Image: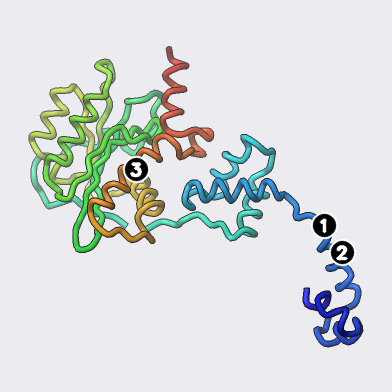
Amino acid sequence: MIVLALKNEYSLKHLLNAVELPRSVFYYQKKSLGKPVPYQEERKLISDIYHEHKGRYGYRRVHLELRKTYKMNKKTVQRLMLELGLKSMVRPKKYSSYKGEQGQVAPNVLKRDFNADKPDEKWVTDVTEFKVKGQKVYLSPVIDTFNQEVVAYRVEKHVRLTLVTGMLEDSLAKLDSRSKPIVHSDQGWQYRHSKYKKMLKDAGLTQSMSRKGNCLDNAVAENFFALLKTEMYHGRKFESANELISAIKEYITYYNQKRIKVKLKGLTPVEYRNQALKEAA
């Protein structure tokens, strides 16, 4: 406070007149300076949580983490984050794998009903594209709608059929023989391909496809891609496709094992699945 700094050199009256500050306000501010800042420990923990997750957490997830240590309502956390200048990242757009009428379209069995009562009941999949230094990188994951966990994925520099069939092969290797999930996708050429369709049929799984040009039919996959690109891709500079691929792999591990979700009662996807399996045992 400039008035306090100069008070020993100049009269208080002239200083207050110079800065047009009422005497009552001066004494109020002077008194306030001696008071401790409220929520000091909570502010530090909020900042630590925010930076640990690289700015990916908004006030809701920060609140869920914080309540493990402190009792505080969401609105207070939101206000403190605003005061600290901590703002979560915001989202953008998508790659289309549709190449025209190639292969047979499966019916829309899922019909936007993404709710599942147990793990491995409903899976969704899609392909998204990244660009770095003139190169392209493609990610193909399988996501369980029960807990939004990435069951398996492939990430490559080319959008070949093996991107999707390899992903499906990895997913089937983890699947309990008694589970037969619906596998939903858009109408991309890879999902119409006879090899992909045969892999599903041989495993006894039901194929489902979105209606043409209807991205909301595959909203769980769309949301995951938007989240991933917001939290680890947009706003970051990558020097090579290999560096980006490593970052994608690192993020998916983080997403499955460390990133809590409000809809999963403050648990990570892996924790939520393990809890459900334990309760069902």
Alpha carbons under labels 3 and 1: distance apart = 44 Å
Q: Residue 80: name its quadrant.
A: bottom right
Task: Tell me where residue 200 appears, x and y as whole percent.
Answer: 16, 28
User: Quick one: label 3 or label 2, which is nearer the N terminus?
Assistant: 2
| Amino acid beneath label 3 | Glu
**Label 1, on which residue?**
35
Vertical comparison of 30 with 99: above or below: below
| Amino acid beneath label 1 | Lys
Task: Tell me where residue 70 appears, x and y as whole percent.
Answer: 67, 38
The label shown at residue 250 is 3
**Label 2, on which residue?**
31
- Quarter of the picture containing the N terminus is bottom right
Task: Tell me where residue 19 appears, x and y as whole percent.
Answer: 80, 84
Alpha carbons under labels 2 and 1: distance apart = 7 Å
| Residue 217 visible within the image | no
* 158 lies left or right of 116: left
